[in-house]
Amino acid sequence: MPAVTVFGLGNILMADDGLGPYVIKVLEAAYVFPPEVEILDAGTPGMELSTILEDSGALIIVDTVRSDGSSGELRTYRRDDVLKHPPAQRITPHDPGLKETLLVLELQGETPPEVYVIGVIPERVDYGVGLTDVVRAAVPGAVAEIIAELERLGYPAEARVPPADPDIWWERQPKA
C-alpha cells in the first residue's frame, strides 16, 4: 500500500475535465517520486471510487471543481472542507462522488489519514479534446500544490534533469 496516492480525475474527451489526467502526465514527465508515492490517472470513476480509495494512505486528488470564481482559478480543499456540506445530487456519470466515497470509507473505518483536493474551475466541459488556454495556464500551479503537499507529508519528489516532454497522447494529431 502506498503511503500517498496522487489521483488525477477527469475525462480527456470533455475539454477542461481532462485536467486531472493532464496534470498526472506533467508530474510523471517532470519528477521522480519516492517508492511510497503512487501517481495514478484514475479517469472517470463513478461509484467504484470507494473501492479505488479504500486502504489508501494519504490522498491528493486533482480535478476540475464547481466553485464560485473565474475559470482557471485554483481551489484547494482538505477532507473537512469537502465534507462540510451534504453531498450534491450527481448530475453526470463522471461526477466522482468524492463526498459520498469519503463518507462510506468513514463508516467502514477506512478513512484516509489525509485528503487534499486541488481543483481548477473549468471554462468548458463539453465534448472536445484539449484543455482551454485558461485551464492549461493553471496546470503549473496545480503541480506546485501537489509537490508542496508531498513535501509536507514527508515524501518529496525529485525534479527530473532534464524533464521529459509530457505524453499528452490524446492531444496529438493523428499521422496521415
Image: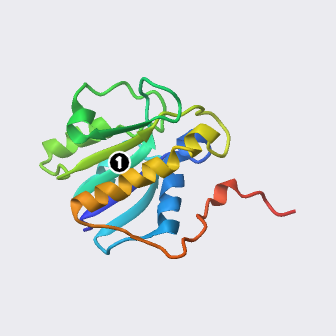
Decide: is 161 above or below 40.
Answer: below
* Left or right: 79 as drawn, with respect to 29: left
Q: Quadrant of the N terminus?
A: bottom left
Q: Identify the residue at horizontal 21%, vertical 51% (top origin).
A: 114
* Left or right: 144 as drawn, with respect to 155: right
Decide: is 66 above or below 156.
Answer: above
Could you say where residue 82 lies in the image, as x and y percent from the top left? 27, 35
Could you say where residue 81 lies in the image, as x and y percent from the top left? 24, 34
* Number of numbered callouts drawn: 1
| Residue located farthest toward the left when viewing the structure as drawn | 109
Task: Judge by depth and name the residue closer to the eye, 92 or 21.
Answer: 21
Asked if residue 116 shows in the view, the reply is: yes
| Residue located farthest toward the right when viewing the structure as drawn | 176
Asked if residue 132 shows in the view, the reply is: no
User: Type of residue at label 1?
Assistant: Leu
Which quarter of the figure has residue 37?
bottom left
* Left or right: 172 as drawn, with respect to 24: right
Q: Which residue is mark 1?
A: 49
Determine the secondary structure under disc 1. Answer: helix
Q: Identify the residue at horizontal 38%, vertical 44% (top origin).
A: 118
Q: Identify the residue at horizontal 57%, vertical 71% (top origin).
A: 164
Label 1 environment density (alpha carbons within 10 Å; few <14, some 14–19, many ≥20):
some
Task: Judge by depth and name the residue closer to the eye, 78 or 127.
Answer: 78
Could you say where residue 151 lies in the image, as x and y percent from the top left? 28, 61
Q: Quadrant of the C terminus?
A: bottom right
Could you say where residue 172 lies in the image, as x and y percent from the top left? 72, 58
